[in-house]
Image (tube, rainbow, N blue to C red):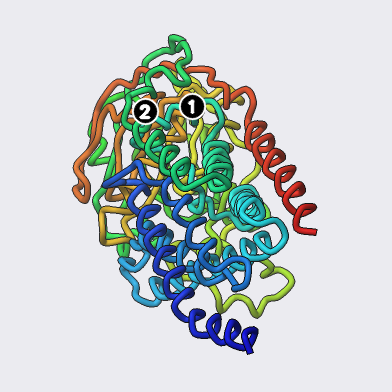
Amino acid sequence: MLRNAQVSSMDLQHPRSYLAAVSVACLAGLLLAAAAPPAVVSITALPSLLVLFVSIKLLAPHRDVVWPLFAYLFVGWGISYGWILDHAWPQTALVSMLLLALVTLIGAILARTGFRLAGVFGVVTAMMLYEAILTFGPVPMPLVSVGYTAEGTSWAGLVSLFGITGVSFLMWGLAALAAQRRVRVQIAVAVLWVLAAVSGLDERIGHFPSRHAPPLSIVLVQPGTSSETWADIYDDQRVEALVALSGAADGLWIWPETALPIGTVSRQDSLLRRHASTDVISGGIVVGDGGDVHNAAVYWRAPHRPENEQLTWNGKRRLIPLVEFIPGLAWMPWLRFLRVDSGGALGYSPGGERAVWNAGDLRVSALVCFESLFASEARAAALGGAQLIVVLSNDGWWESDRMQLQHRDMTALVARATGRTIVMAGVSGWSGVLSETGRMVDEMPMGEASSLRTEVRPHPRDTLYLAAGESFSALFFLVVVCLSLMQWKRHD
């Protein structure tokens, strides 16, 4: 009878324990969202992980923890990237939200599996693995990284040491170690994290000497055109409008993503010969020799010999899933129905080796939009000799400014990690200049047609991340895997 009474008591407590665990997990998700760029409160990322582990322990070891995990990820990621609902086309916003829910559910299931095998360390191992797959795998979605929450805090200095993924893995690992201790130890860790985040230590953490690089005069052009109009990839007249905004100034003209209408290299070269009077770096939709279509960055040098083509380009290497390509489409053509329409061509082919160009006396490379969220792509450009990185984007599909500002802040972390000055050119914003420490140097008014004439003075730095790459990410992952194995043996 006593045993039956205990079972009955557990059944009665089951709904309450689930409600409590999910509620605490939602609170943890809110703390994570508060720290996401552009953050209102940028110091709550590590505390959010500690609160998550509290929610899990409210159910463990007798209950399934998948729903608290799902609640944490969905609230945290859903609010952080809620701008996807502001897309100009409602159907695209709906599909994007469903995709986010799917990514969240997969993450929660993986984390639940890790918890069953090795407790909290198993959760952390699963989340690290999931982040690595979504950052470096064939279907890239790097926004899941907790490392981006370092922007705006003193912990941002760590990205020049460990990279963005490395900082994320470090945070997960520290939270898991603290979660094994008493509550007062966890509180002390959270308080110390917050105090260090506002201490100003980023000026001392990861400080590397800078080198002199030649200055470069640029004309940064923001057409301020609506995305629906910009989606017309056959409009040659936009080149005339861009030239008018660029004015008669010398220097390097920089135009945003897909500024040049779709065409072969010869066609785009001919178009620029007719209108441009100086060197241009621009986005463009380039049709390759085999008919494959690329969302490309184009560098055109004002010709000295009219018979020679002066246009070189490299295609975007990191394509947005379901928007710019559909995974597995070559083997399963019926997957075409999954495509999220966001203007441009019906699909792009990925680019090859990252190009580095000589612009005057400066070595310059270009990333296309989404690519600037990958520190590994900027690192490849820097290792190829780039002293300045240009980012060409079109973030105007979202009616809220939050997406553009988030793109800016995340790119600022990439600038800091690689020690390279970054110039961003957007169709309607954000457009401006970020220093090699991620500090904003110049900016243009968002949503307006305007141009910025300035002289960029890069001071490239050779950071530890630039030399070591993702080595520290791998090291932190291996440490957590070893701790998970130890916990798994104890469970057995």
Relative to the observer, which residue lies in front, 157 or 121? Answer: 121
Would residue 209 be visible to someone looking at this image?
yes
Return the x and y of residue 90 as percentages of the image width and height.
34, 75
Relative to the observer, which residue lies in front, 124 or 306? Answer: 124
Mark 1 vs mark 2, foreground winner is 1
For badge 2, the amino acid type reads: Leu
Q: Which residue is mark 1?
A: 364
The local crowd at label 1, few if under 14, some if 14 to 19, many if 20 or more residues have their Cα within 10 Å, is many
Please identify the quarter of the rendering in which residue 344 is found: bottom left
Mark 1 and mark 2 residues within 8 Å of each other at the beta carbon:
yes
Q: Which residue is mark 2?
A: 252
Which residue is located at x 60 percent, y 32 percent?
380
Q: Is residue 334 left or right of residue 413?
A: right
Please identify the quarter of the rendering in which residue 116 is found: bottom right
Which residue is located at x 49 percent, y 40 percent?
367
Figure quadrant of the N terminus: bottom right
Q: Secondary structure at mark 1?
A: strand
Numbered tag placed on residue 314 in the rendering: none
Return the x and y of residue 143 as percentages of the image width and height.
48, 52
Q: Secondary structure at mark 2?
A: strand
Relative to the observer, which residue lies in front, 333 or 174? Answer: 174
Relative to the observer, which residue lies in front, 82 or 214? Answer: 82
Of label 1 and label 2, which has the lower sequence position?
2
Which residue is located at x 59 percent, y 47 percent?
317
Figure quadrant of the C terminus: bottom right
For badge 1, the amino acid type reads: Val
Q: Is residue 50 above or below residue 78?
A: above
Q: Is residue 191 left or right of residue 58?
A: left
Return the x and y of residue 45 as percentages of the image width and height.
41, 46
Return the x and y of residue 65 as percentages of the image width and height.
57, 69
Would residue 265 be visible to someone looking at this image?
no
* Disc 1 to disc 2, C-alpha distance: 11 Å
